[in-house]
Image (cartoon, coloured by chain):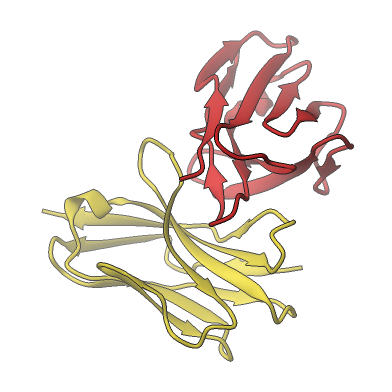
Amino acid sequence: AQTVTQSQPEMSVQEAETVTLSCTYDTSESNYYLFWYKQPPSRQMILVIRQEAYKQQNATENRFSVNFQKAAKSFSLKISDSQLGDTAMYFCAFIRGGGADGLTFGKGTHLIIQP
Amino acid sequence: GAVVSQHPSRVICKSGTSVKIECRSLDFQATTMFWYRQFPKQSLMLMATSNEGSKATYEQGVEKDKFLINHASLTLSTLTVTSAHPEDSSFYICSAFPPGGYTFGSGTRLTVV
């Protein structure tokens, strides 16, 4: 079974600052995907970024980037130039290759961007 | 992109009654859908995997007789909470895995009074 750990229940930063959210995972699988999801107060799950385990290059999406350390089983999310709209719960998630399983989520980090 | 439509968004029901939640894939066929439950200030927990034309697979600890799942077509999965009790009050979210990645419904807030 897989586990996903997010050790930061809450973080708060000033607008325009850079913030890094931590995530570690444990698995014996070699083929898997990792995700960061954003859940604003509306509770709609929004995909922020995904990383395929077989890719060495870290994924980036505009202001969002990850630091994927496969050997260390670490998958952190960096948000640059943070904006008020980034305030939300952020969940790290894992799925093994194939897509036939549901996602395994971490407990989440509540990110607050202060004006 | 692929869209999953979930209804209702909110429902209040009396204790002892049943409530049905629908999850539809609008522009793709979903042979498999997933149902999650999220308690306040907690993460999403996978409840069950819904398979078109066959029985659902439930996660350990989930009562299959209480949470009935039907996936009768390639675009519709339903979750029925039977004999609901206040402890079943929660946020229920469905998802599917079309080409391109996971897609979530907008969720259903169930309140049992």
| Extreme-bottom residue of the structure | A71
Q: Is residue B109 visible?
A: no
Residue B17 visible in the displayed image: yes
Q: How many labels does the image show?
A: 0
Q: Nearer the viewer, residue B30 or A45?
A: B30
* Residue A17, placed above or below residue A28: above
Residue at 42%, 66% (x, y): give it.
A8
Chain coloured red here: B
Q: In this view, does A107 lie above or below A96?
A: above
Percent from the top left, x then y, of residue B39?
A: 57, 39
Q: In this view, does A27 lie to the left or right of B52?
A: left
Residue at figure coordinates x 26%, y 67% from the top left: A62
Name the residue nearer the viewer: B30 or B87.
Answer: B30
Q: In which quarter of the image is residue A86?
A: bottom left
Q: In which quarter of the image is residue A17?
A: bottom left
Say which quarter of the image contains residue B77: top right
Chain coloured yellow: which letter?
A
Residue A10's x, y, as percent?
36, 59
Q: Which residue is drawn at 35% across and 39% down?
A: A41
Q: In this view, does A59 lie above or below B70?
A: below
Residue A65 on image: x %, y %: 34, 74
**Relative vertical location of residue A8 with respect to residue A110 in this rendering, above or below:** below
Which quarter of the image is occupied by the N terminus of chain A?
bottom right
Q: Position of residue B101 (x, y in %)?
A: 55, 56
